[in-house]
Amino acid sequence: MTEDEKIIRKEAEEFYQWKIKNSGNTQPIDDFKDLKYRLHDFYTPENKAVFLDEIQLKITDNLKKHRDSAHGGKASPTCSYENTAEKLLFYIRQEIDTFPKIAHQKHETKEGKSRTKVFISYSHLDKEYLNDIQRHFKPFLSHIDFWDDTKIQPGQKWKEEIKKAINETKVAILLVSTDFLGSEFIATDELPPLLKAAEEEGAVILIVILKPCLFEEFPELNQYQAMNPPSKSVLKMDYDEKEELYVNLVRQTKRILNS
């Protein structure tokens, strides 16, 4: 986490405690309006996204604590506190969707387990997209261990090389399309160990939706964060939108590796 991000998250925590947690507003939309006004203090979309992300984490964490203490850990449709928090989270999620995504690590890395690689999983029918992502990572290859299957040299046992790379992966970038979802090799040899690493060993899954596909039909994947919504696949983006997506992909990858 950079020093700037630490400052912004601290600002968000203070704003939550001062302005949202005990606001006295009867309607969550009024809290959201105060939040929107506060966003004007942050100039870049990335900084606004970090601020909103921290607010969302605070509200979600306090909602969980409330449910644990008041409702045995379960949601209560009749609870006014929960209804207010859920409505405010709904407004915040809509706003967050207009900004670059902020990636999160789901679990801590196991002690003694070294994971440093960035692994790209993709269908070879989507090779053109891999080329673009390689271009964006290229300026940082001196300190990012970037790996895709083009690194496999002639004569090497390719399945063993892929398995070795997965075992060292900290950030797995999945380039999702219908061809990706339909790949038997990805489904049997790449996804299971990557998803297990994300669940148990602190690896992070980042998903880029390349083309329109039934991503929502794969719960083992859609539980992880997509850097762009399925409704806005890379195929539908103009040049500037694609470049911004890839820049944020690199930014979030660096952020995870440095955290």
Image (tube, rainbow, N blue to C red):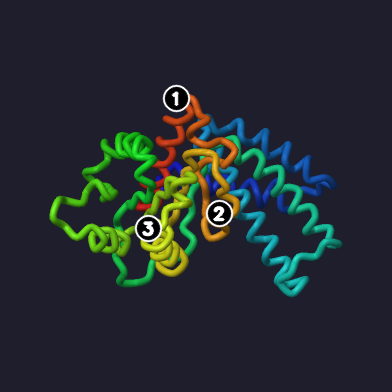
Residue in the foreground of this view, choosing between 13 and 239 = 239
Q: Nearer the viewer, mark 2 or mark 3?
A: 3
Question: How many neighbours does mark 1 have within 10 angstroms: few (below 14), some (14-19), or many (20 or more)?
Answer: few
Q: Nearer the viewer, mark 3 or mark 1?
A: 3
Q: CA distance from mark 3 to mark 1?
A: 31 Å
Q: Is residue 78 left or right of residue 11?
A: right
From the top left corner, tell me how far across and down residue 1 is, in percent.
41, 49
Above or below, comparing residue 68 to residue 257 in the picture = below
Quadrant location of the C terminus in the rendered image:
bottom left
Q: Is there CB contact under 8 Å for labels 2 and 3?
A: no
Q: Earlier in the sequence, mark 3 or mark 1?
A: 3
Can residue 34 be seen from the camera position used here? yes
Tag of residue 239: 1
Q: Amino acid at mark 1?
A: Tyr
**Mark 3, secondary structure of its residue:** helix
Q: Residue at x 58, y 32 (%)?
A: 41
Residue in the foreground of this view, choosing between 190 and 32 = 190
Q: CA distance from mark 2 to mark 3?
A: 19 Å
Question: How many neighbours does mark 3 have within 10 angstroms: few (below 14), some (14-19), or many (20 or more)?
Answer: few
Can residue 202 be seen from the camera position used here? no
**Mark 2, secondary structure of its residue:** helix
Residue to which mark 2 is pinned: 222
Q: Earlier in the sequence, mark 2 or mark 3?
A: 3
**Mark 1, secondary structure of its residue:** helix
Residue in the foreground of this view, choosing between 130 and 66 = 130
Tag of residue 185: 3
Q: Amino acid at mark 2?
A: Asn
Q: Amino acid at mark 3?
A: Phe
From the top left corner, tell me how far across and down residue 30 is, in percent.
78, 40
Q: Earlier in the sequence, mark 2 or mark 1?
A: 2
